[in-house]
Amino acid sequence: MKKVLKKIYNSIPFKKELFSLLKFFWIPPHSVYKHLHFKSVFKVKVSRSVSFLINNYNSEIENDIFWKGLTNGWEKRSMKLWIQLCKEANVIMDIGANTGIYALTAKSVKPHAEVFAFEPLKRVMEKLRANNDLNGFNISCINKALSDKTGTAIIYEQDTEMINGATLNAENGIANYLDKKSEIETTTLDDFLEEKKIEKIDLLKIDVETYEPQVMEGYKKYLSIHKPTFLIEILTDEVGNKLEKFFDPLGYWYFNIDDKTDTIRRTNKLMHSDYFNYLICSEETARKLEMKN
């Protein structure tokens, strides 16, 4: 029966147009709209005057953004902070870019900024580049993973065309049920900066499924010089503890982000996030953000 219903649903034409009309009058609850997928291009509004286009690949993230908007659904508090931070940044890194929502937002908000998007999976990189081309952006899309060494590594992922989590951390619990392994290229951030002659990073988003400490290990040479702002995923206390050794000596402030409740709170330690992400920044940046809120 499920296969029959799915076949009927897939045969319905103009789903985007129908759903866009429905949104004008009523947005169904998540329990309903999570089933209302479609494959098509749609516009994502960042503000009244800023927007970008994105291919809907039937992922949960894209679906949530279509129905709820960029700053009212998926990672809503993180995205609001990201938008504010991008306005002041000239060199922006999206590490673990997936199809590029954070990178696309950054380029929309700050068109003249240099935006670099790292995505190691080739099938996902194709989607990232398609979204970049769709908007005529010049985001630098790099088909490598950032790591603590330059060379190659094994990445664990699901053997499906759906865009799901992947990890380079064999000790990560999700690696146990990811049924596909492949070799990918890696580079350290320090090596990449020297290769591209990039003098300073202002802002980084890092979402690499518990591999964040290894990414930071590859940035030790220039971290204290750049002292950029981070939006970083912390899924476990162990990851948080490992990250503190990079940030504590530099006087960073830590803010635990709860995207479910749209709140943020300052903490003295890095531990499992209330949702996914932390804002890690200087005192000066924190005070600027508080003034803007």
Image (cartoon, rainbow, N blue to C red):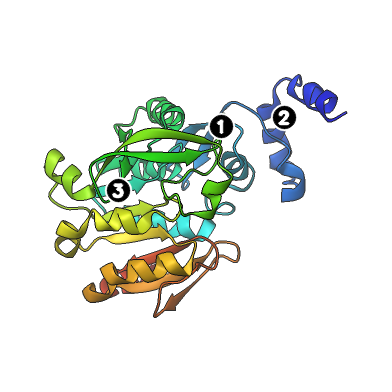
- Count residues near mark 1 (Cα–Cα under 10 Å), then give few for <14, some for 14-19, many for 20+: few
Foreground of the two, 107 or 241: 241
Cα distance in 3D space between marks 1 and 3: 23 Å
Relative image position of residue 33 (x, y in whole percent)? 72, 43
Query: Mark 1 near mark 3, Cβ–Cβ under 8 Å?
Result: no
Relative image position of residue 251 (x, y in whole percent)? 25, 76
Cα distance in 3D space between marks 3 and 2: 44 Å
From the viewer's perspective, is residue 39 above or below residue 84?
above
First of labels 2, 1 by sequence position: 2
Residue that badge 1 annotates:
159
Relative image position of residue 224 (x, y in whole percent)? 17, 65
Q: Nearer the viewer, mark 2 or mark 1?
A: 1
Q: Quadrant of residue 3?
A: top right
Type of amino acid at the residue the image marks with label 1: Asp
Foreground of the two, 89 or 165: 165
Residue that badge 3 annotates:
147
Query: Mark 3 near mark 2, Cβ–Cβ under 8 Å?
Result: no
- Count residues near mark 2 (Cα–Cα under 10 Å), then give few for <14, some for 14-19, many for 20+: few
Q: Residue at x 45, y 49 (%)?
A: 170
Foreground of the two, 21 or 55: 55
